[in-house]
Amino acid sequence: MTEKSFFYAVGRRKTAIARVRLQAGTGTITINERPFDNYFPSVEERNAVLVPLTVANAKEKFDATIKVIGGGTSAQAGAISHGMARALVESDETLKKALRQHGLLTRDPREKERKKYGLKRARKAPQYTKR
């Protein structure tokens, strides 16, 4: 590690934005000033957040302080995972290859398509009637 006291990165997914700050510690994760287990009651979302730390083998090395806004819980978990992977690369450049192979550094570009006029949703049209 370098002389910096913490490593900062931003992660995004759909409309969620997560600001992740990693610093040397024991593995405590705080999201919006709430404990990690309290913020994500779902096991799948908790696992999604922990994937970058597991790949980098750094679960017990860093404390994470995270501010996340927008989106739903799934999008927030994806944004946190993205931001955590970026912060880990900032802390140690050699982790980049492993994190890239697991697809953790690529931002998921899928966004909600806008609704078009004359349609019920983005693509769903009203039922066609012949007579």
Image (cartoon, rainbow, N blue to C red):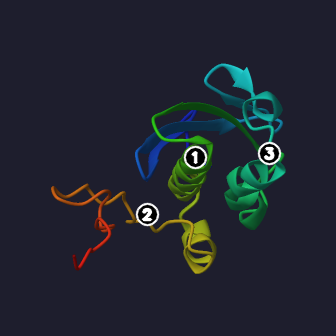
Closer to the camera, 108 or 103? 108
CB-based contact (under 8 Å), mark 2 and mark 3 = no
SS at circle 3: loop
Q: Residue furthest top?
A: 33
User: In percent of the image, x 80 and y 28: which residue is there?
Assistant: 38
User: Which residue corresponds to the image point at 61% horizontal and 67% vertical from the top-left?
Assistant: 95
Where residue 109 sits in the image (x, y, percent)?
38, 65
CA separation, marks 3 and 1? 15 Å
The amino acid sitting under disc 2 is: Arg
Look at mark 1 in the image and give the residue it sits on. 80
Query: Measured along the vertical axis of the image, is residue 71 above or below residue 48?
Result: above
Marks 2/3: CA distance?
22 Å
* Badge 1 amino acid: Ile
- The residue that mark 2 highlights is 107
Secondary structure of the residue carrying numbered label 1: helix
Which of the marked residues, 1 or 2, is nearer the chain's N terminus?
1
Which residue is disc 3 drawn over? 42
> Residue 42 falls in which quadrant of the image?
top right
Which amino acid lies under the numbered mark 3 shown in the image of this protein? Ser
* For marks 3 and 1 on the same chain, the one whose residue lies earlier in the sequence: 3
Quadrant where the C terminus sits is bottom left
Residue at left 51%, top 55%? 86
The image shows residue 118 at horizontal and vertical percentages of 17, 59
Within 10 Å of the Cα at label 1, are there few (<14), some (14-19), or many (20+) other Cα atoms?
many
Return the x and y of residue 59 as percentages of the image width and height: 80, 50
38 with respect to 117 (left or right): right
Q: Is residue 64 left or right of residue 3?
A: right
